[in-house]
Image (cartoon, rainbow, N blue to C red):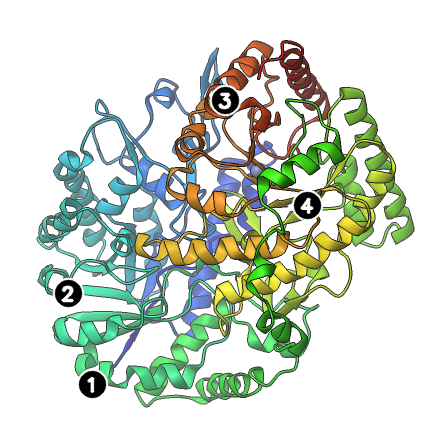
Amino acid sequence: MTQIHNLGYPRIGGDRELKKAIEQYWKGHLSEAQLQEVGRAIRLENWKTQIDAGIERLPVGDFAWYDPMLQLAQSFNVIPKRHRSHQQASPLAQLFELARGASHCCANQAAMEMTKWFDTNYHYLVPEFEADQPFSLGDSPLLAQIDEAKALGKPLKAVLTGPLTFLYLGRNDSDNILHRLDELLDVYAQLLNAVADKGVEWVQIDEPILALELPLEWQQAFSHVYTRLATLPIKVLLTSYFGAITVDWPTIASWPVAGLHLDLVRAPEQLEQALRYWPSDKVLSLGVIDGRNIWRSDLKATINALETAQQNWQQQLWLAPSCSLVHVPVSTEREQLLDEELLSWLSFAKQKLSELVCVAHYLDGKADERDSHWLAQSQQVVATRQQSLRITDHGVRDRVMQLTEDDFHRATAYVERAKLQREALNLPRWPTTTIGSFPQTADIRQHRAAFKAGRITPAEYDDFIAAQIDDVIARQEALGLDVLVHGEPERNDMVEYFAPLLQGVAQTQFGWVQSYGTRCVKPPVIFGDVSRPKPMTVRWSAYAQSKSAKPVKGMLTGPQTILNWSFVRSDLPRADVADQIALALRDEVSDLERAGINVIQIDEPALREGLPLQRHQWSAYLERAVRAFRLSASAVKDSTQIHTHMCYSEFNDIIASIAKMDADVITIETSRSAMKLLDAFEAFDYPNEIGPGVYDIHSPVVPDATWIEKLLRLAAEKIPAERLWVNPDCGLKTRDWPETEASIKVMVDVARKLRQQGNH
Ligand code: GLN
Ligand code: ZN
């Protein structure tokens, strides 16, 4: 019999209960005991959902208050020095301080750093390994959670991030963190012994770094780690996901683990290797239901693909989703706005469990009525989705087919364009601008909520937005900025805003996914060919422009960013979907230009995060991403200036591609690295204009004029001053007005001073 298990279930709760409760607790409206109770209820509900669906071995330890990496760091006493001196009320209070930062008695305890979890949109907290902080087993909530789960009377499997992934993803102050591996393994051993003492037979040890191209010493460390863990009285299921294991198969087969999990959705070719190398008397767990996307599976095809595996491993075959289900929303059941057809194509965490169970039951020849229902639905969807008229838009397909190389290039080279733009826009040296958004005040959020709830009419809402734009234009004129923005008051989120305006893209009501901590996002669903039935941003941009004699920037989100922050259809290559989005944006760019907008910014903050996990796939990705950007941007006149914006701090390895985007101006994040970032641009001899962010918008602190001046002078050593712009690091929507105006004033004053000094 095939064993059905699950790697992890969304911890946010069906109605984001966890988020809501934690935020209440932070505000002091909920006691810690009450918060603990909410956590317990969510865990219980999740286990019951899994039992009802037919999951035979329940995961324990997939729950985390804020982040599993943070939880593990705390359990092993990996606490940064700056957080150590203060006595905490409870481990939970400490956990939240580590995540969010704190200030106790004159000292500021900065939060732990957060970064993206592989190529997902989830962010984990980065463990900080300090040489003077030994690993030791502190308070681990896992043991108490095992007691809770045991009461349900089902076989359990503890879930733990593996020691190598933990070390690899952390930050350390020693040269080679692998020196501390044995010390760490002692602590893992202690914890796992305690888990085994509770009668838990299996532990799932997640080592997603197996899908990365690892340095040899890290590859070799696997053998050491798992030989050591094999001596413990618990069976280890070594768990990989997000791609094929990069270590060679004879080596994998030599690791003394009791079981191995493979992600067959991302890397189906692994099955063939496993058949060749993985012993049939050891457990093989196959991830066959996509934990990263929201489409209903082709169950018949999945069952068929597993027949050989079942014959080979028989009792030792386990089935699971490809990875933890935390990357998909909880359940489709509450969705009411999506039409029936589209809804029938979707499968969120809860539905995925049933799909998985259906596959296993058919394989074992014990399918019941429920399973046959899931299979029938799957077959129905497979048969109809391909033919559905809403997937294929011949107009879009024809346009893509007819694209020629010219569509991907501006008509004239940058050097020529720049002259025309300078004349047309009449900008001073050191031109100043901002990145797009201005403070999203409580007033704005209340009006948007009232509009959505129908408490104010569309006309009232429009009047309100117009008044907001009047206000930001007036403020920017008063501040003396050179290129203005409309402030984005009508946008909640830079991707979500475009979803309802694009054909082929849908927005769910409850499709929340944890992004980090208590922050959840609702990614749009790109289900069909994408097009733009009518202008999306022209109205407010043109309105803003009508209020000023200075240029007002049009503001769009780029193809790669829309793609990356959405759930994307699986029946078309992602790069092809990006081209379709680019075409829609191209029309928007042309309409903006026609409406008198002479500067248009196409934001691509997600371009870098879309990079594949393995480097050898980077160039193919970058090539298409750059082309999609250019497709969106290239239809304009020479005198129209295209900007792009990227808020990150690492360009060295992609600078050639950034240059190929051929944006007239790129604004980037540089203030925190004190312009170090510009080294890449200097070394590469980046040809176009750059706006290196001169102050960090993540901080409420008003920047210092001398500091900004110093940064700009540093920048001018690397990039000719006539190609430099002056702007903040990123959009200002999270800031308040007083600090925003004060900061911009400092920035504009510095630019004026530099102009007067003729520093160029
Ligand atoms: N234009 C957007 C803003 O200013 C850019 C946001 C981003 O880079 N993430 O808010
Ligand atoms: Zn940004």
Label 1 environment density (alpha carbons within 10 Å; few <14, some 14–19, many ≥20): few
| Pointer 3 residue | 715
Label 4 environment density (alpha carbons within 10 Å; few <14, some 14–19, many ≥20): some
Measure the C-alpha gap from mark 3 to mark 1. 64 Å
**What amino acid is at disc 4?**
Asp
| Pointer 4 residue | 638
Lower sequence index among marks 3 and 1: 1
**What amino acid is at disc 1?**
Gln
Q: Residue at coordinates 66% horizontally, 31% vertically from top-left?
A: 434
Q: Quadrant of ligand 2?
A: top right
> For the residues carrying marks 4 and 3, which lies nearer the camera in this image?
4
Ligand 1 within 8 Å of disc 4? The answer is no
Q: Quadrant of residue 156?
A: bottom left
**What amino acid is at disc 3?**
Ala
Measure the C-alpha gap from mark 4 to mark 3. 27 Å
Measure the C-alpha gap from mark 3 to mark 2. 49 Å
**What amino acid is at disc 2?**
Trp
Ligand 2 within 8 Å of disc 3? The answer is no
Callout 3 touching callout 1 (CB < 8 Å) = no
Judging depth in this view, the residue of 608 and 192 nearest the camera is 608
Q: Is residue 299 above or below residue 609?
A: below
Measure the C-alpha gap from mark 1 to mark 2. 21 Å
Image mark count: 4
| SS class, disc 2 | helix
Lower sequence index among marks 1 and 2: 2
Q: Is residue 187 above or below residue 107?
A: below
> For the residues carrying marks 3 and 1, which lies nearer the camera in this image?
3
Callout 3 touching callout 2 (CB < 8 Å) = no
Q: Which mark is residue 311?
A: 1
Label 3 environment density (alpha carbons within 10 Å; few <14, some 14–19, many ≥20): many
> For the residues carrying marks 4 and 1, which lies nearer the camera in this image?
4
